[in-house]
Image (cartoon, helix red, strand yellow):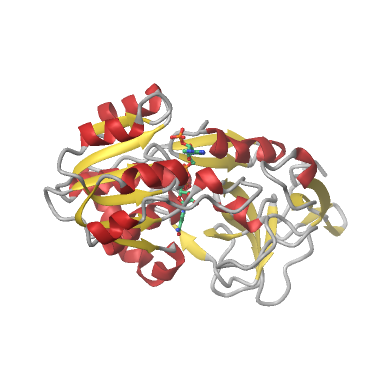
Amino acid sequence: MRADGKSRAKCRADGTRIRGYGKITMTISNRQVRLAARPVGVPRDTDWKFTEEPVREAGEGELLVRILYISLDPAMRGWMNDGKSYIAPVGIGEVMRAGAVGRVVASKNPAFAVGDHVQGMLGVQEYAVSDGSGLTRIDPGLAPIPLWLSTLGMPGMTAYFGLLEIGKPKPGETVVVSGAAGAVGAVVGQIAKIKGCRVVGIAGGAAKCDYLHGVLGFDAVIDYKSADLRAALAQACPNGIDVFFDNVGGDILDAALSRLALHARVVICGAISQYNNIGPPKGPSNYLSLLVNRASMTGMLVFDYARRYRDAGREMAGWMADGRLKSREDIVAGLERFPAALLMLFKGENMGKLLLELPDN
Ligand SMILES: NC(=O)c1ccc[n+]([C@@H]2O[C@H](COP(=O)([O-])OP(=O)(O)OC[C@H]3O[C@@H](n4cnc5c(N)ncnc54)[C@H](OP(=O)(O)O)[C@@H]3O)[C@@H](O)[C@H]2O)c1
C-alpha cells in the first residue's frame, strides 16, 4: 500500500480488493496534522504533530471521504487557544479542525454516494470518516472545486452577509475594506462595487494594491505598509467612510474610526493583526467617533447565515458568470506544508483565498 492510500492492484472504493482467490481487506493509511501544544504568539512547528494511522472502516450511516482541498483560515489561530469562543477549542492531540472538500470513496449513508464531492469540517488530514452531519454536497461541474472553499464557500458568504446585512451599503456611499486583497476582503470590495458604492481597499504592498485597482476595479487603494494611513484615508474618503468592513483590527481600525461619516456602519468581521498577540487584543481608542457620528459597530459571524448560503451562492455565481465578481485562489500543495502555509496568512503572503491541496494521484 502506498502512503497516498492507493494500491497498484485494483482496489474497491471501500478499501477492499479482489486478487486471485478472493477478497483481501486493504488498510488505507491516513496522514494527519494534530495540535500538539497551545501556541504562545506565532505558532511554531513544535505546536504540531504529524501522525499516520489506518483509516477505520465506515460504519452503518457513515461515509469515508478522501480530502482534496483544505481551507486555511485566520480563525484557525483562535481555535488553537484555550478559552471561551463561538466554538470549542481544538483539544491537544486532536486532528486540527479545518473546512475542506473531498470525494466520497465509501458510503454506508444513503444521503451520499461514492463519487460525490462534499464540503464540511473534515480536518487537516487525508481521509475523514463522517456520519454526514454538517456535510453538504457540492457540484464540481458547476464550478471548480477550489471555488467551493473560496468565493462560493465560507469566505464569500462572510463577505456577502457581512457587507449586505450589517454594512447595508447604499449606492454612492463610500465603503472601505481592510485585508482587501484576501479571501473575504476582495469579495467585499467587489460586491460593494456591484451595489454602486465607491470602494477603497487597504492592503499590504504594491502588488496587492495594483491587483485591487487594476483587476478588481477598486476606486482607490491604500498600501498600509508604506502610506501614512490617516492621511491616505482622508485623501481617499473626502466625505468620510459610510461603511468600514474590518478584517484586521488594531491600528487600522483606529484610523478608520477617525474618518467615519454620519451614521456610518462598522462591520467587525475579524482582527487578524491581533490573533498572535501574547496579551489581550488592542482595542480602538477612537471609539467616541461612534458617538459623534451616531455610528454603529457590529460583530458578525458567518455561521449565523448558514440557512441562506444556497441563495447567496446562486446570486454570487450569477455575478461571476457576468464577469462582475472575480475569484482568486492561492494554492499550496502537500499536507506536510500545512504549518508553513498557515503562517502565510499572518505574513501577508497570500493573495486571494489560501488553500492546501492534497494531490490525489
Ligand atoms: N466573522 C466571520 O464569520 C469570519 C469568517 C471568515 C473570516 N473572518 C475574518 O476575516 C478576516 C480575513 O480572513 P480571510 O480568510 O479573508 O484571510 P485573508 O485576508 O485571505 O488573509 C489574511 C490577510 O490578512 C492580512 N494581515 C495579516 N496580518 C496583518 C496585520 N498584522 N496587519 C494588517 N493586515 C494583516 C494579510 O494581508 P496584507 O498583505 O494586506 O497585510 C493577509 O494576507 C480575518 O480576520 C478572519 O478571521 C471572519
Q: How many marks?
A: 0
Residue 189, visible in the rendered structure: yes
Question: Which image quarter is the N terminus in?
Answer: top right
Residue 218, visible in the rendered structure: no
User: Does residue 73 appear left or right of residue 298 in this picture?
Assistant: right
Rendered residue at 54%/42% (across/down): 355
Give the quadrant of residue 122.
bottom right
Residue positioned most to the right = 21
> Percent from the top left, x then y, of residue 59?
73, 73
> Percent from the top left, x then y, of residue 232?
28, 31
> Percent from the top left, x then y, of residue 245?
34, 50
Give the quadrant of residue 2.
top right
Question: Which image quarter is the C terminus in?
Answer: top right
User: Does residue 56 appear left or right of residue 205 in this picture?
Assistant: right
For residue 173, above or below residue 220: below
| Front-most of residues 253 and 22 | 253
| Front-most of residues 148 and 277 | 277
Residue positioned most to the left = 172
Rendered residue at 57%/75% (across/down): 110
For residue 271, above or below residue 331: below
Rendered residue at 52%/50% (across/down): 282
User: Does residue 157 appear left or right of residue 15 in this picture?
Assistant: left
| Front-most of residues 74 and 139 | 74
> Percent from the top left, x then y, of residue 225?
43, 27
User: Does residue 21 appear left or right of residue 305 in this picture?
Assistant: right
